[in-house]
Image (cartoon, rainbow, N blue to C red):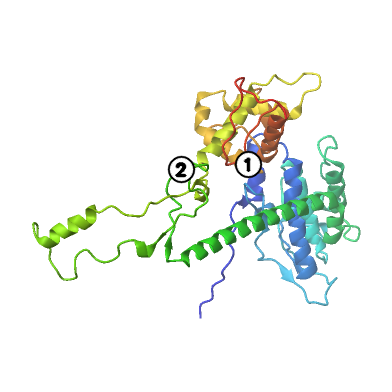
């Protein structure tokens, strides 16, 4: 008998490829906002494995953590070396020497029994890798790597580049003695602020999806109710024949199916020949005008959202902000500085016309990717250029989109909600502040 295992499809790339791509683009670390977003999801996954399923992964490496590019959703993969202990074996020890040496805990390297805290040690190595884009323990051969792991010999994080919570979490996880190393529950307590931010974001996402689902259900219900009325033919898709203030607005125009001629022009089985009496009757019937007048009010029409309108709105906002004065050198507005650098880079070269679709699409989607200012072929920006200065700011498209909307509002830029038509501005090109 042949058995098949049906598994969920995981899109995206491994964390190893994700960090390698950032390093190739000239970054020295992931933005801390992205680091926490990925790290919190890994912690929640390990909390589920250790706490509810009593499973130790035992091979938690960057190659076994999958990250989606745009949403940064994380999934843990490759449970080939995982071990599930019995329900009563809460603190039972494991002795198999498995895993990858770069992410193995000191107990495994020293061939000692170990617990679920081996995954916590690997978790600390992943946090270090996202913070520096390199592994904490490296060497020319496995023996030198093992020595550094046992002695916890690694280059500590720079306090000037990382927050106190990231520094403290990494130091408390990478502890040689497993008795003093926190378990996954204690790790979640160490990152409570980041965990709360992630849960708030997840709650907003769920509420947004529920709202969209309710709208889709209501639309489907209206379609079913309309389909359940075959006796009335409503002409809601035609162009309006009068304005809202015109005559007949308060009447609900509809035409019953019975008022339309339904009998056949030619009896079944009869052949019509040119010049015959039956042929003349057919043409006479076809030329008779309908007695009913079809009238559709404007209120029965549905607004059609032009997909190009949202794209033009984003492009117009960028053009509007590009005309604003440069921020002051003494106390520059970091938001305006980032937006104007992005505008200057995007419209600086003629071949950037080929990446306009990519850039505006990421702004509209509020992507969590970092604005790296890569060219048409993915090449990094030139050193000491505006694109390089913007890439060094490590700002995401989501944050950049927020800056654009906020600065537009502060400078009197009035626009309708996304998808609607913007109201006309005054003759000066700028609308007065509210």
Please provide percent x and percent y for residue 334.
Answer: 75, 28
Please provide percent x and percent y for residue 64.
Answer: 66, 56
Which of the marked residues, 2 or 1, is nearer the chain's N terminus? 1
Question: Which mark, residue 434?
Answer: none
Please give the name of the residue rendered at 14% of the width and 57% of the height, measured from the top-left corner.
280
What SS does tag 1 mark? helix
Q: Is residue 37 above or below residue 399?
A: below
What SS does tag 2 mark? loop
Question: Which mark, residue 242?
Answer: 2
Mark 2 touches mark 1? (CB < 8 Å): no
Counting every numbered tag in the picture gives 2
Q: Which image quadrant: the C terminus?
A: top right
Please give the name of the residue rendered at 58% of the width and 61% of the height, measured from the top-left corner.
217
Q: Farthest residue to the right: give it.
A: 180
Horizontal side of 68 relative to 228 (left or right) equals right
Q: Is residue 12 visible?
A: yes
Mark 1: give few (<14), some (14-19) or many (20+) Cα within 10 Å.
few
Q: Is residue 277 above or below residue 429?
A: below
Q: Quadrant of residue 404?
A: top right
Could you tell me how far apart the alpha carbons at marks 2 and 1 are, in whole angstroms? 59 Å
Q: Is residue 136 visible?
A: no
> Which residue in the protein does label 1 denote?
21
Q: Quadrant of residue 384?
A: top right
Between 3 and 144, the one nearer to me in the picture: 3
Q: Is residue 429 above or below residue 161?
A: above
Q: Is residue 72 above or below residue 282?
A: above
Please provide percent x and percent y for residue 272.
Answer: 12, 63
Mark 2: give few (<14), some (14-19) or many (20+) Cα within 10 Å.
some
Horizontal side of 303 relative to 373 (left or right) equals left
**For the residues carrying marks 2 and 1, which lies nearer the camera in this image?**
2
Horizontal side of 356 relative to 92 (left or right) equals left
Between 42 and 83, the one nearer to me in the picture: 42
């Amino acid at each position: 008998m042949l058995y098949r295992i049906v598994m969920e499809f995981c899109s995206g790339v491994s964390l190893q490829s994700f960090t390698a791509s950032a390093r190739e683009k000239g970054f020295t670390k992931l933005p801390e906002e992205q680091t926490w977003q990925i790290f919190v999801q890994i912690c929640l996954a390990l909390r589920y494995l250790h706490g509810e399923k009593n499973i130790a992964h035992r091979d938690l490496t960057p190659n076994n953590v999958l990250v989606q590019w745009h949403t940064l959703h994380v999934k843990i993969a490759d449970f080939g070396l995982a071990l599930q202990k019995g329900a009563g074996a809460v603190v039972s020890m494991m002795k198999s020497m498995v895993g990858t040496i770069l992410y193995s805990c000191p107990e495994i390297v020293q061939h000692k029994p170990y617990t679920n805290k081996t995954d916590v040690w690997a978790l600390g190595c992943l946090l270090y890798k996202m913070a520096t884009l390199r592994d904490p323990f490296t060497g020319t051969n496995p023996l030198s790597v093992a020595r550094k792991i046992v002695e916890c010999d690694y280059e500590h994080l720079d306090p000037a580049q990382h927050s106190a919570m990231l520094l403290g979490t990494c130091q408390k996880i990478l502890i040689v003695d497993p008795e003093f190393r926190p378990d996954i529950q204690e790790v979640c307590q160490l990152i409570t602020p980041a965990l709360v931010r992630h849960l708030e974001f997840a709650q907003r996402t769920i509420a947004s999806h529920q709202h969209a689902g309710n709208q889709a259900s209501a639309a489907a219900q209206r379609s079913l109710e309309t389909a359940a009325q075959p006796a009335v033919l409503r002409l809601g898709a035609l162009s309006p024949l009068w304005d809202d203030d015109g005559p007949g607005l308060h009447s609900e125009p509809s035409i019953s199916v019975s008022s339309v001629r339904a009998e056949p022009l030619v009896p079944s089985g009869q052949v019509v020949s040119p010049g015959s009496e039956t042929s003349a009757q057919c043409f006479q019937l076809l030329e008779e005008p309908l007695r009913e007048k079809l009238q559709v009010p404007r209120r029965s029409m549905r607004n059609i959202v032009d997909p190009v309108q949202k794209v033009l709105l984003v492009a117009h906002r960028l053009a509007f902000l590009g005309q604003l004065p440069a921020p002051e050198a003494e106390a520059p507005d970091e938001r305006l500085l980032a937006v104007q650098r992005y505008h200057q880079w995007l419209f600086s070269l003629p071949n950037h016309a080929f990446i306009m679709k990519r850039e505006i699409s990421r702004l509209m989607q509020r992507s969590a990717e970092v604005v790296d200012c890569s060219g048409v072929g993915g090449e990094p920006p030139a050193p000491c250029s505006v694109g390089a200065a913007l890439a060094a700011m490590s700002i995401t498209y989501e944050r950049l989109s927020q800056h654009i909307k906020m600065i537009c509002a502060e400078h009197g830029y009035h626009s309708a909600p996304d998808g609607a038509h913007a109201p006309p501005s005054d003759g000066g090109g700028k609308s007065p502040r509210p």
